[in-house]
Amino acid sequence: MSRFLSKNYEKLVPYTPGEQVNEKVIKLNTNESPFPPSPKVKEVLSEAVIDKLNLYSDPELKELRKAIAEQFDVTPDMVFCGNGSDDVLAFAIMGFCGNGGKLCCPEISYGFYPVYADIFGVELEQIPLKDDFSIDINDYIGKGKNIVIANPNAPTGLALSFEDVEKIVSSNPDNIVIMDEAYMAFCGESCMELVKKYGNLLVTRTFSKSHSLAGLRVGFGIASKEIIDDLNKLKYSFNPYNLNTLSIKAAAAAIADNEYYDDKIAQIVKNREYTVTELKKLGFKCTDSKANFVFVSTDKISAAALAAELRKKGILIRYFNKAKIDNYLRITIGSIEEMQTLVAAIKEITEA
């Protein structure tokens, strides 16, 4: 740490991203899709587009916002796009909770929430989950604070129902409720329709998981025009050109190709169920994950040791050295061949 860093950030504990490697491994540690993007993405990234990279990208993101709006039956002025959904979450937490505002979230959830709270001076309450890792919605009914919930939650994979989300949103009319739906494509109970009914709801999504575009960093939020106007005020005060031209083109093409992505999502869900079934045969406990990963534990070997042994076999999974979940592993769902290799490796390790 240099002597120039502001004292406000000296004690900041940054988010730890999943490991990225160059060597050939089975990579099940960062919740990426095992499938390539839609062929339509390649079609739009033409030489003509590349030749125009000397020009700035469209700060209004008209093409992408229109494509997203059509997909979710809203108007473009209800759509905000960011450099990944992290960008959207950061602007929202800064804008609606910063400088002493109040926010609450599950104690075990996406690691960026407390980081953003620290950066933006937010008074954060982290609410414990129930013993089975599920969220007790009664903890959020009439809370009187801004709320952010990942649904399905990460790393547990457990999801709230549409009805439960509406209870939370409707009971906190004077506070922003952010539903982080990064993994909702693999679940199917989105609360997106509720943005038309409630002016205090912001729903965020990402192209990284379901649309195979993690490397392009595109996310978006849908909410009332007034909330989107607030987010745009912050964006234009920070980085008007927050998405590049290639990302805009690729994401607009991707979100329109429902046939391709519906098929890939169905395959991932099928592979998820296969993995859960096989791991349970080996004595593992698995949460009822509705995401593109599973959250598992076993009494046969510690989570840290199993992650280390799998790494020796060229298989990366995610171990969180944190209280309450330090004997659980989060395993991304890959291709069926990758999951079969994983199961065989775990069987060999645990039955040795």
Image (tube, rainbow, N blue to C red):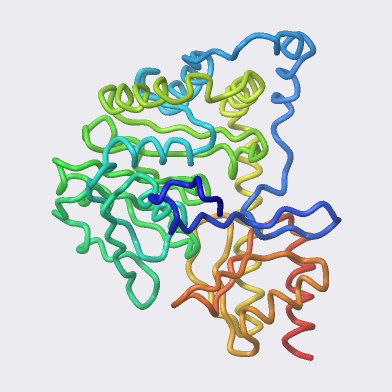
Relative to 232, 139 lies left or right: left
Q: Quadrant of residue 314?
A: bottom right
Relative to 234, 173 lies left or right: left
Q: Quadrant of residue 252?
A: top right
Viewer-closest of 187 and 136: 136
Viewer-closest of 185 and 247: 247
Residue at 48% over, 67% down: 288
Quadrant of the image containing the N terminus: bottom right
Viewer-closest of 132 and 193: 132
* x and y percentages locating residue 42 in the rendered image: 75, 24
* Vertical order, 216 against 150 (above or below): above
Relative to 229, 86 lies left or right: right
* Vertical order, 22 against 70 (above or below): below
Q: Quadrant of residue 203?
A: top left
* x and y percentages locating residue 312 in the rendered image: 82, 73
* x and y percentages locating residue 222 in the rendered image: 37, 31
Residue at 70% over, 35% down: 37
Relative to 124, 152 lies left or right: right
Residue at 63% over, 25% down: 247
* x and y percentages locating residue 64 in the rendered image: 52, 20
The residue most toward the right is 24
